[in-house]
Image (cartoon, grey):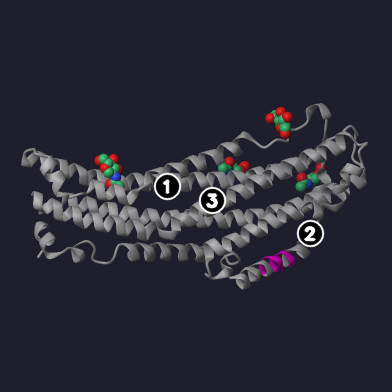
Amino acid sequence: MKNRFSKELILTIAILQFVTPIKLSQQYSEGENFSITDRHKIPDDNISYMFYKSAQDANEAKNKLQNVLRNFVEIVQKNLTTSVILKSFYNELHVERSQQKFQKLSDHTEFFKIVSHDLKEFSLKSEIFLQTSKNESNAFLMKLRRIPTRQRTLSSHDKLQLTNYFAEMEFFNIMLFEIIDEGLEYITNALNIIRMIFDKYTDIQQQNLQYQNFIFDNWCYNRYFEFLQKWSIQIYTCATNSRLEAVYNVFAMTEIAIKHIIRQQEFKVQRIFNCFLFPGCNIKCNFLRYAENDFQELFTIVQDLQTYYDIQINRGRVKSRRIERSEEILHLNDLEVIDSTEQCIPYGFPENYMLSNLKLCFNIY
Ligand SMILES: *[C@@H]1O[C@H](CO)[C@@H](O)[C@H](O)[C@H]1NC(C)=O
Ligand SMILES: *[C@@H]1O[C@H](CO)[C@@H](O)[C@H](O)[C@H]1NC(C)=O
Ligand SMILES: *[C@@H]1O[C@H](CO)[C@@H](O)[C@H](O)[C@H]1NC(C)=O
Ligand SMILES: *[C@@H]1O[C@H](CO)[C@@H](O)[C@H](O)[C@H]1NC(C)=O
């Protein structure tokens, strides 16, 4: 494990070194276009409300999903019980009891529909949060173009420093966007796989309920309850297993890293604005001369996040994924969805997995 860990780091550093010379050789002519703003009209240099809101929405969607799935196994066992005590407790007419059981089956089917919807919501809100993060980071970069200052023009020295700083931040954004995309791809893909499995299972349950040859007697209900209880737990476990936990972890870690990074960018931009608003404090603005050093901490965070992804997500899967991101990957994801669905809901389910006495209830011979 340790060996692999260090290999990932070396790889990340190698990528960094590979990209760096390209950056330096680029001409940042657009950097010349830094405009100056009246100091009374300082552009809003704060983190937007949208950013915090999108993070909050994603967290709420995550909590909702976690709540729905809480104690799943216990609830299924309770909902689909065939216990003798309950049978004698409900001393109603046969028809009423059947209706009640039918209702329980509908509720159970409905449950998977709700989960599917909540999975979609979490996926969507995560995506909005991560896209908003990219926009936010980019907005801070763009703010560097409009420097509030008392001077009427920027000296060429200042311009050069700003250009370098802008280039460094731009380069940082490229690395940041790349890792955000990787996290996003993983989260949405994993949630999608779970959703596909649940959707398929919902369809199967619905078909069973609507199956015209189903014999609605109490004995058959109980056999079918037993069957569903076993398979719901099995399919649920197969679909979510370590996958959902990894998604929660990746999301949480990404959120922490991004929030820190965006706050640091806010701080950096405000600090630069102050340098030009109060030109007296030149020593404090030394950081402008060492843009690379100034971004070192943020680069380290991105690298650490990458290492975390490599361990959580890829778990020894092909490392080159990120580099050759393309339609090929999308194709690979599609295969992964089909693969996982078939793994959790085996071919020939449910007929081939029913005991012969349950088959009789469905008039299957
Ligand atoms: C920079 O300013 C020049 C002259 O105003 C303009 O032609 C050029 O398109 C600008 N570049 C960018 C990247 O805005
Ligand atoms: C921006 O943030 C600073 C503190 O970082 C706060 O004092 C100021 O009120 C904020 N401005 C806006 C427009 O939210
Ligand atoms: C259990 O039954 C309740 C009440 O019918 C229903 O709201 C809930 O979704 C069911 N949960 C599961 C996991 O079937
Ligand atoms: C990000 O910015 C782009 C371009 O300005 C915009 O089209 C998109 O809607 C924004 N995305 C979010 C999630 O705010």
**Residue 241 found in image quarter:** bottom left
Q: Looking at the image, do the residues carrying marks 3 and 1 touch, with CB atoms under 8 Å apart?
A: no
* Residue drawn at x 35%, y 48% as measured from the top left: 71
Q: Which residue is mark 2?
A: 26
What's the residue type where badge 2 is placed? Gln
| Image location of residue 331, percent across then percent down | 46, 64
Seen from the viewer's position, the closer of residues 98 and 71 is: 71
Q: Secondary structure at mark 3?
A: helix
Is residue 12 magenta-colored?
Answer: yes
Q: Is residue 154 left or right of residue 308?
A: right
Residue 251 image label = 3
Q: Is residue 231 left or right of residue 59?
A: left
| Image location of residue 283, percent across then percent down | 91, 43
Q: Which residues are magenta?
A: 11-17
Q: Is residue 337 left or right of residue 73?
A: right
- The answer for how far apart the CA atoms under marks 3 and 1 are is 15 Å
